[in-house]
Each structure stands twice: as C-alpha cells, then as structure tokens.
Image (cartoon, rainbow, N blue to C red):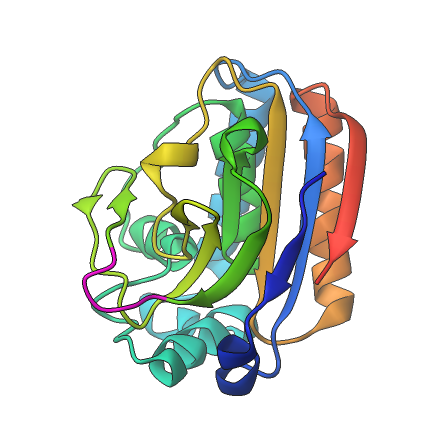
Amino acid sequence: MLSIARSSEFKLLVPSFVGVFIEADVINSPTSPELWRELEECGRDLRVRHTPDSLKMQSAIAATRAAYKACGKDPSRYRPAGEQLARRLLQGKELYSVDTLVDLGNLVSLAFGYPTGLLDADKVEGNVLLGIGRSNEPYEAIGRGMLNIEGLPVYRDEKGGIASPTSDSTRTMLTQETKRLLFIINGYDGCRQEMEKALCHALDLLRRYAQGANERVVWF
C-alpha cells in the first residue's frame, strides 16, 4: 500500500501545501470522443476566463509559481506542466491527445489549475517522499529527456525521483498496460475546498472513462 509524506525541508519552504492522491485500479485506452469533447469544452471555457497574462494570477497557478521560487527554481523557465498546457490553449494552439489516463489528468489540471501527477503505481518502489531536487540529481522526464530538477518540488521513491510538477519521470510513466494508477493532485495554494472539488472531478472521470475501481484516497 503506497504512502506519501512531505519532507521537513519542503514543509518549511512551502507551508501552505495540501496534497491528495488517488490509488485505483484502472483500464487505460485510447481517448474516447466523449472525453475529448470534455477537454475541448474546458479549453473553450479557459479561453473565455483568461489571457496568457491573467493566467499567472489564477490562485492555484500563482501559488505553484511562488512555490517554485521558494524552492529555488524559475517558474517561467521550468513551467509546471498544467500551466504549459493552459498557455498552449491561450496562445491559440491545439490540444494534443495521449491516452485516457493522461488526458483526464490534463483535464483536471486545466479545470482547476492544480499540477497533477499520474504514475503507474506498480512501478513505484516503496514509500514516496515529497522534497526538493538536488544538484546533479538524475531525472529523465517524459518528453524532455534529462531534466535539471535542482530546486524543483520532486516526489521520490526508494530508487529516486518519480514526479515533479514540470514533468513526471519516464520510470513510472503510464502505458496501455497500466492497471494500478497513482493520481496526485498538488494544492500549493492550500485551498482544501477547491482541492476537494478537483478530487471529486478526478474520481468521476476515472470511473466514467477508465473503469476506476477499488479507489483509495489519502490527503497528505
């Protein structure tokens, strides 16, 4: 059974953080037209509410950027993935599809602004600790190659880094064969009420599109 905790260093630098994770049995698949329509609708709503400049002031995104600065990273150079995706939409670019699990994670992030991490739980080794990346710490990021995670918030298992808000690790990445999911929602603004809404939305999407079952929800 997976557990996640925050390191003392992280608690000191980012005291407002509230995190929650879902561990669930799932079935991954190519993204359905129904899920894609939900993503597109969310994108249209985002374009109505924000510009690239106003996006940075959205509570969840602003707090994540502040946390990057507190930990020692430039959030404009190493943007959180959810902010990257939202900016892409606001710049008039098209969404891209990966698979059901990745796309529903992106949907939650777009809808609420919170960074999400979606990992294959069966590839996680032991307990997980949320801390801060160190100098020259090896980390191969999905779609980015070797990533300099020094000063980034980073989740580590017993073998090393597995997730950060900028990009998750290739070692624990999802595939079509993923059967057990670890879905992390990162609330850097500490707003428990909004986090609960994001959690409910994530659970609903998992049940409707990934046959989510045997869920375990843990706040940390």
Q: Please name the residue shown 79% across and 34% down the image.
A: 215
Of 136 and 218, nearer the camera is 136
Q: Please name the residue shown 34% across and 66% down the image.
A: 133
Circle count: 0
Residue 25: where, in percent of width, then height? 70, 23
Does residue 41 appear anywhere in the picture?
A: no
Residue 158 vs 166, above or below: the answer is above
**In the picture, which quadrant includes the C terminus?**
bottom right
Q: Please name the residue shown 27% across and 61% down the image.
A: 149
Residue 212 vs 115, above or below: the answer is above
Position of residue 77 in the picture relative to residue 27 (left or right): left
Residue 29 vs 116, above or below: the answer is above
Please say whether residue 151 is one of the residues in the magenta stretch: no
Position of residue 107 in the picture relative to residue 141 (left or right): right
Residue 175 vs 184, above or below: the answer is above
Q: Please name the residue shown 46% across and 76% down the image.
A: 62
Report the predominant secondary structure element of the magenta stretch: loop
Residue 129: where, in percent of width, then height? 54, 59
Please say whether residue 134 is one of the residues in the magenta stretch: yes
Does residue 207 appear anywhere in the picture?
A: yes
Of 78 and 54, nearer the camera is 78
**In the picture, which quadrant includes the N terminus?**
top right
The span picked out in magenta is 133-137
Residue 34: where, in percent of width, then height? 60, 21
